[in-house]
Image (cartoon, rainbow, N blue to C red):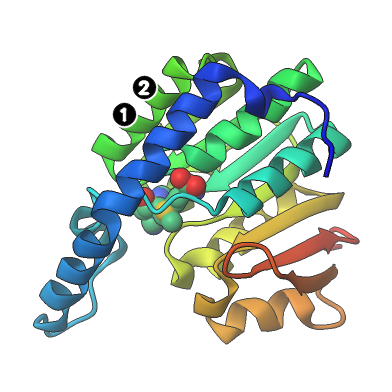
Amino acid sequence: MTTATTGLDDERVGAVLDEIARTAERNDPDVMKRAYATAADWPQPPTAQEAAELCAQAALPVHPQVGTFLYQLIRSLRPALVVEFGTSFGASTIYAAAALRDNGGGRIIGSELHPGKADRARSHLERAGLAGYAEIRTGDAREQLATLPGPVDLLLLDGWKELYLPVLKLLEPALRTGGLVVSDNLPMLPPEFTDHVRAAGNGYLSQQLPLGDGIEFSVRLQQEA
Ligand SMILES: C[S@@+](CC[C@H](N)C(=O)[O-])C[C@H]1O[C@@H](n2cnc3c(N)ncnc32)[C@H](O)[C@@H]1O
């Protein structure tokens, strides 16, 4: 496969993405094992906040296939506004911001519940030279994404899986007709979410794509009346 040089080939971008990938390879399996073992003893499933604390040292980046797909979509769509649920250390944000820079403009608003992770994502974006294209909001996406500067052209869902549907419903009024929703980690998604985007009459055309461990890819065909 031959490709043109893109912002993903930029040395600083590549160095930060590699560093996040290496950190994930080194730490994530143990962090996640400990998180599941700890929560298994709790009487209730962890809240989103508790889960974020348990996974504070896990990078959990998007698979490079998903990151590259985001880059491609953004280069093609030329969005003014990309919104992200679940920023973590900022890998997906970097793929998106690199595409926005190559487009010559646009902005990504990310959201991250864990303050330490949000700070780390901001510093990664700075080191990648992409801070001017991204804003990371610290806190619960259900509050942080309630106010946006304009219509959403592309939405990436990559936070806790049980919150994909509430976050999508919050953003639906802002999602423009023709806007895209990329939902990562399809095998882990609750059926209520996939039922919602696949059901006739809900205003999406949606299907799974074999990128990473699977994504759901949805096009918003109409806004709710
Ligand atoms: C799979 S990771 C995101 C990975 C990131 N997209 C990347 O490619 O590097 C999921 C992240 O979502 C965050 N998260 C979970 N629930 C959240 C919420 N309600 N609001 C904001 N962030 C949340 C977690 O703290 C975690 O860091």
Q: Is residue 127 visible?
A: yes
Which mark is drawn over residue 123? 2
Q: Nearer the viewer, mark 1 or mark 2?
A: 2
- Do the residues bearing badges 1 and 2 touch, measured as CB atoms within 8 Å? yes
Check disc 2 and give the amino acid type. Answer: Ser
Query: Residue at coordinates 70% horizontally, 69% vertically from top-left?
Result: 210
Quarter holding residue 106? top right
Query: Which element type, helix, strand or loop, lies under badge 2?
Result: helix
The location of residue 64, given as percent across then percent down, is 58, 49
Q: Is residue 86 visible?
A: no
Query: Which element type, helix, strand or loop, lies under badge 1?
Result: helix
Q: Is mark 2 within 8 Å of ligand 1?
A: no
Q: Which residue is mark 1?
A: 119
The location of residue 11, given as percent across then percent down, is 55, 18
Of residue 193 and residue 185, the one placed in the foreground of this image is: 185
**Disc 2 packing (10 Å; few <14; some 14–19; many ≥20):** some
Of residue 151 and residue 80, the one placed in the foreground of this image is: 80
Query: Residue at coordinates 64% horizontally, 53% vertically from top-left?
Result: 66
Query: Residue at coordinates 82% horizontally, 50% vertically from top-left?
Result: 179
* Horizontal relation, residue 5 to residue 190: left or right: right
